[in-house]
Image (cartoon, grey):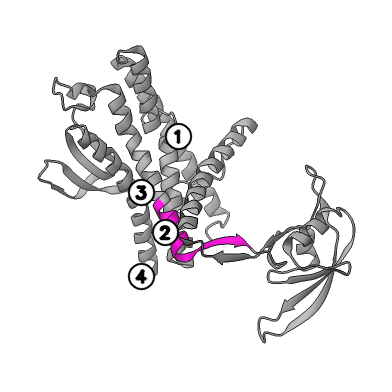
Amino acid sequence: METVLRFAITIFCLGLVVVIHEYGHLLVAKYFKVKIERFTVGFGPEIVGWTAKDQIRYSLCAIPLGGMVKMAGEYAEERTNDPHEFFAQAWYRRILIALAGPAMNYVLAFVLFVFVAARWGVLQPSALPIVGNVIPGYPAAVSGLQPGDVILKIEQQPIVTWKEMAAYIHARPEQKLTVEFSRKDAKNGTESIQYSTLTPQKDPTQGIGLIGVIPSMDKVKLGMWGSVRAGAKDVEAWTLQPLAYIGMKLKKMEGPKELSGPLGIAHMVTQATKEGVAYVIYLIAVISTGLGLFNLFPIPILDGGHIILYTIEGIRRKPLSMKSLQFVNMFGLVLVLTIFVYASFQDVVRLRLDFWK
């Protein structure tokens, strides 16, 4: 039953971001009075569907990946002289229709980020010298420091804040240090004073000392405006970080092995369900940001690719030839399928390496 529930939550998360994306296309297309023939969630055979009063066929299909808003005259062989067809619209209107899908994903992400921050607060590094986690292989882990330890002194120097501790360690690379800390016994709750000796390793890029500790996190309520600012920062972070990562991989000519496909996303949703509702909602926001960003990439058949093609049309003041459109769309389809297969392969590799545990 638990497995079925998590599978249902995964489908819901993926379905929600797809529906919001396609609904953005639908809203703007209807605003410009473009005739909509079908609104589809998923691909393959229709499981359930209905035709609304506006003559749009709404369908839920068997394969829960992606979706589509089918507009009249969207394909060359279907075009007539009907002014309500998609390609009868001015190039800049078609850009707005294409842009509406990713824009709605970003709106959803922002709203959910703000909601999580306002309802549950945000995590911020504690100002106290409390070890939140230790990085394997670094001096802190080797010396026996554990999450929850409170640093009291280093070389008899009293430590009051995390900033003081970090500054002291950074200034002493490759120097042996004696650390005094307090540790609470998990069984009986008693505290004891303990000592550890470690040598900060020198960071090759900055030349500072590092012992491999991460601060504990405090959950802080920010109020409404603070939550709005936090939501905006989350949207910015989840947009810029993937771009920086892709840029780094391209510069190094490496494959993005951390890229996740449907199996990887399902794993993340499963992990989030174990942590609670806030984590699930936050993950939906992250996925929505990712879908919006991916669709803005200038790849033919994606919204970003369409925007580029329509912009070229506007500059040239005449549409591209059917042969050119067919070629670039076929190239885009092959590229997207390649990315999908590669991401799915990386998911399977992580599965074999016990990633799913």
Up-down relation of residue 77 to residue 39 (above or below):
above
Q: Marks 2/3: CA distance?
A: 16 Å
Q: Marks 2/1: CA distance?
A: 36 Å
- Span colored in magenta: 111-125
Q: Which residue is mark 3?
A: 17
Q: Which residue is mark 2?
A: 115
Q: Which residue is mark 1?
A: 338
Give the residue type that dot 2 points to.
Answer: Phe
At x 39%, y 63%, the residue is: 6
Q: Secondary structure at mark 3?
A: helix
Give the image quarter of residue 190. Answer: bottom right
- Front one among 131 and 79: 131
Left or right of residue 52: residue 121 = right
Q: Which residue is mark 4?
A: 1
Q: Secondary structure at mark 1?
A: helix
Q: Marks 3/4: CA distance?
A: 25 Å
Mark before the other along the chain sequence, 1 or 3:
3
